[in-house]
Image (spheres, grey):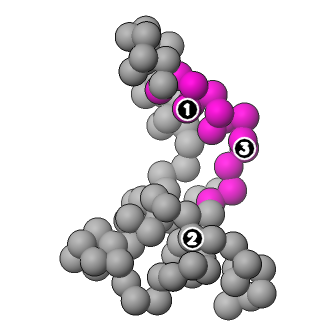
Amino acid sequence: MTSHRKSVQPEALATLGEASRAGGRKPDDIGLSATPDTTPVPTRPDLKDEAATKVLRRGVMGSDEGADAAAKALPDRTADGPKSAG
């Protein structure tokens, strides 16, 4: 594990994905530092912001501005993880 990974927190959705693959329990090797499986997946912040805005607007205002498409355009953090994103 590189020193960069030690300073990075694990991504929450990746941690949940690892827990689901481990029978619903967080694996012991996942703590406050990211593992190769929980390292954040690089994603353009503007795409994440746009998707989050559309999802929140749909929930609050009931208007569909393409929330599903915007969310699906982002990397799948739970199924693929960092290894296959990119």
Given residues 53 and 83, the one toward you in this image is: 53
Residue that appears at 48% across and 52% down: 76
Q: Distance from label 3 to label 1 (Cα)? A: 13 Å
Q: How far across and down, in percent of the image, does residue 20 sit? A: 29, 69
Q: Distance from label 2 to label 1 (Cα)? A: 20 Å
Element carrying mark 2? loop
- Magenta highlight: main SS: helix
Per the image, the residue denoted by label 1 is: 52
Q: Would residue 14 be found to the left or right of residue 45 on screen?
A: left
Badge 3 or badge 1: first in the primary sequence: 3
49 w.r.t. 60: above or below: below
69 w.r.t. 12: above or below: above
- Residue 36: tell me if it is visible: no
Q: How far across and down, in percent of the image, does residue 50 sit? A: 63, 28
Residue 44 among magenta residues: yes
Residue that appears at 39% across and 21% down: 59
Q: In which quarter of the image is residue 15?
A: bottom left
Q: Which amino acid does label 1 sit on?
A: Ala
The mark found on residue 10 in the picture is 2
Q: Would residue 54 be found to the left or right of residue 49 on screen?
A: left
- Residue 50: tell me if it is visible: yes
Per the image, the residue denoted by label 3 is: 44
Element carrying mark 3? loop
Q: Which amino acid does label 2 sit on?
A: Pro
Residue 2 among magenta residues: no
Q: Give the range drawn in magenta.
A: 41-55
